[in-house]
Amino acid sequence: MLVTLLMSDYKSTITANFKLFHEENKTDIVEVSNVFSANLNDNSPAQSLCVNSNNFLCNYDLTKPFNFTSQGLFFDIDVTFDNIGTSLWDGFVDDGTFNSFDGSLFSLENACNIISYPNELRTQCCASFIPAPKVTSNYPKCKNFRSRWSILNVDDNYSIFATSVVNYTLEDNAVSANGDFNGPANFSCEYSFNNYGISIM
């Protein structure tokens, strides 16, 4: 995985290679290497790369490879230039592959993900692919999923205090959700999907 970040507001750029070491039923290891960074004003390098995953780790010597473990959880990698930090990567590792923050998959037909913000351009490209394991059974995919929960009032014979229902729909590679919350007006709930939440009032 080759990741490039260009920040026009701070006139800086950084590129880095991510490599995944994956073994079935074991903890994944991500290696960050070949880091090139430059403040385009004075050509000075970035000061650090920090990973927020299971724990918070920083690398202050960007000339050396940097390893961390990922257990299928969302992680982000931040880069710091002149005490100004920004995100280089938002995403997760799942089933032996990198996935972008929105859950989109990299493929031969769609090897790059380009994210544009007002003063920032982030490009993430998968640099190598391996064949996916063959599916042994042809199970149908779940296209619709419903999640429901209730909060019970133990002081009132376990009466229902609040309930929420969310219906998820999978269409192509996009997941949409709509929901309902029934409870006191000053309460709300939040659902999280790949660490990106939706609030329901």
Image (cartoon, helix red, strand yellow):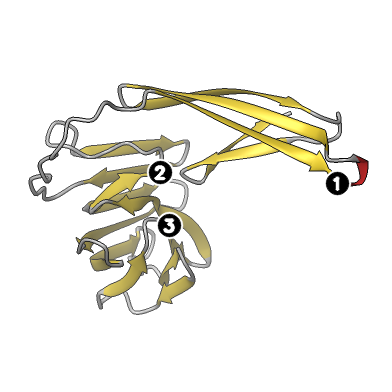
Q: Closer to the N terminus: mark 3 or mark 1? A: 3
| Residue farthest along the right direction in this orientation | 156
Q: Is residue 132 left or right of residue 190?
A: left
Residue closer to the observer: 117 or 58: 58
Q: Are marks 3 and 2 in contact (CB under 8 Å)?
A: no
Residue 45 image position (x, y, % from top left)? 35, 69
Question: Residue tagged by mark 3?
Answer: 75
Question: Residue tagged by mark 2?
Answer: 101
Q: Closer to the N terminus: mark 3 or mark 2? A: 3
Question: Residue tagged by mark 1?
Answer: 154
Q: Is residue 120 left or right of residue 24?
A: right
Is 20 located above or below residue 146 in the figure? below
Q: Are marks 1 and 2 in contact (CB under 8 Å)?
A: no
Of circles 1 and 2, which is in front? 1
| Residue farthest along the front direction in this orientation | 157
Q: Is residue 191 left or right of residue 5?
A: right
Residue lying at 32% horizontally and 27% vertically, measured from the top left: 173
